[in-house]
Each structure stands twice: as C-alpha cells, then as structure tokens.
Amino acid sequence: MEQYIQSQLGEDVVEFKKPSHIVGRTSSASRGLKEPSLREYMLPRLQLPDDRALPGAAIAGPIGGGKTFIFEALAAELDMPVLVLKSIRSQWYGQTDVIFERLRRVLESLEKVAIFVDEADTQFGGVGEGTHETERRLTGKIQAMMSDPRLRGRVVWLLMTARIHLLSPDIRRPGRVGDLIIPVLDPTGEDRRQFIQWMLKPAAQAGQAEGLAQWLDAEGLPPEFSAAGFAALRSEIKAMPPKTTEELKALVGDFIQPAIGPTRRYQTLQALLNCTRRSLLPDPDVTPEQRAAWEAEIRQLELQGIR
C-alpha cells in the first residue's frame, strides 16, 4: 500500500509516519491534557467508522510545547495508516491542482487513513482577497474534503500548529477540525514536577532528586519553561553529568531561554482562545470576562508587532 500511495503522489508530497512511542509512555505537556482525554475520548471518536467519528483535530500551542511528540504517540495508536502531508503545492502552473486530485483519489480508495500535518498554518493558507488564487483554490478544496460526508469516519485530519489563528476560520469551524481544537501548553503543577524529575534522571545526584526538583520548581527554573527546554537540559545533563549538586545548579543557571517569550505568550493565548473544550482548559470555569482579557492581551501584543 505504501508503494502504491507514493507512486501516485511522490515522496515529496507524503510519507508514512511510524511513531515508536505511544500515549501511555508520554508525559503530558499541557495543563489539562491528560492521558484519559486521549484514550477515553479522542481515540475512540477518531476510530469510529461513520458520522459519529470526529473529522479530526487541531492541536495548538506555543513553539516547543510538545504538540508533535504527543500526537505522534496518538497516531501510533490509531490502528490505521498515517500519512504525513509534506507539501501539495507545486511551482509549476496547474500542477498543484493535479497533485490535489491525486491525493483525493488516493484517500477515497482507502478504508481508513489519518492525515498528519505539522506546521499546518504554512500548508493551508487563507481564502481572503489578499491570498493568491491557487492558494485560495487549494485551501477551499481541502476544506471541502474535510467536511465531505462520504469521507466521514474514513479520513482523519490531525493538524499541528503554533499559530492556530492563521488557519482559516473555515478550517476551524465545527464539522472540520473545529470539532476539537486542543491546547498544548507549558507544564505547570504536577506536570512540571514530573518533567523536572525526568530531566534530572541522568544526573549523578539522582538520590537527591526530590530536593533538587523542589529547588528547580520553586526558583531554579523560570515559571514559563517549555517541554523542549526540559528536553534540552536533560540532553546536556546526559552529555556532561555534573558530579555535585553545585555543578548541576551551575549548569541549570547557565541555561538562558531564547528571547521568544512574547511570541510564545501570544501563541499560548491564541491556543486558549481557540480551544473548543472547557475540560481541556487550565480552568474549565473560565468566564467571558477572562476570555475578553485574553483578547485584549492579544491586541496589545499585536500592537508590539507580535503575530
């Protein structure tokens, strides 16, 4: 089947994803996103064969938050072929439409398939007046395919993006991936402590990990620290294991986050604002006033040139 699909579309258009990690072996990288949310709700809904199935999901959140890692694990448990959509645009006039028609025919020929799109905001553009005609036509066709009742329960769309607001409103509406937009945010509380303990495992001071974890949680690391940041520090500890607690603290203190805080804050706010399940928000009882405050903060960041 893999050979047939790639012969129809080409390796530069799609590839097969075969993740080795599964949901039960990943740490949650988000506030409120727990393993039961995936196992008890999302997986069964994606696996249904008819109009009870979710058309797909969009996964939003700041860069470095662990979106792709978590949902690669999800894809590994879907028990269906997972195609990574790399690019369906072509530099040649008319070729984009040809590629799309081939993709549509391939998807219609399969019994069940998941389409995995990373950096989805760069794959699918808008449909507004400022968008190129080819881009509008392609996005319109993708949107129509997402909500095609003949493909409901047969084609699952998993879109990953740090810039959920750049996906067209038509893609984000209910009946397409707007049925489930999930925020994946920086870990806090118990999630953060688990990340810290995981980060410290390669250290020689593993026996003192509890005390070190408490120090790192309280003052050694900034409050906004991403899953990617924890992974980078773990890699450094693993490569050059500190011999003493003081060396470990010095290693952590030497690590400075890049100057992307405002951008990540903007992406976090957009993920919160676009989330379609109260149960997946840090505070399920969020009020209209709090949502209005998020929107106001987004506008302030945009005035600073953050997009």
Image (cartoon, rainbow, N blue to C red):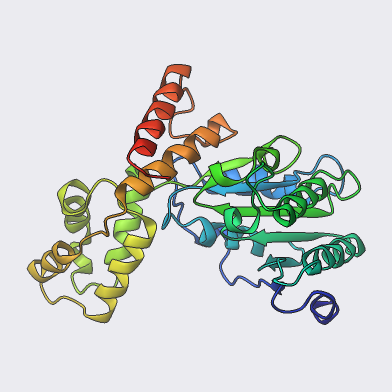
Left or right of 162 in this view: 241: left
Q: In terms of depth relative to the viewer, which is nearer, 11 or 25? A: 11
Q: Residue at x 72, y 70 (%)?
A: 90
Q: Quadrant of the N terminus?
A: bottom right
Residue 207 screen position, x and y as percent: 20, 66
Q: Position of residue 89 (x, y in %)?
A: 70, 66
Question: Residue at point 45% right, 24% down?
Answer: 291
Q: Quadrant of residue 104?
A: bottom right
Position of residue 90 relative to residue 168, above or below, is below
Residue at image position (56%, 59%) is 119
Say if residue 137 shows up in the picture: yes
Name the quadrant containing residue 298. top left
Foreground pick, 287 / 25: 287
Question: In the image, is 181 to the left or to the right of 231?
Answer: right
In depth, the one of 169 and 200 nearer the eye is 169
Left of 17 or right of it: where is 307? left
**Which quadrant would the C terminus be assigned to in this image?**
top left
Residue 187 seen anywhere in this rendered image of the structure: no
In the rendering, at what x and y percent does residue 41 appear?
66, 42
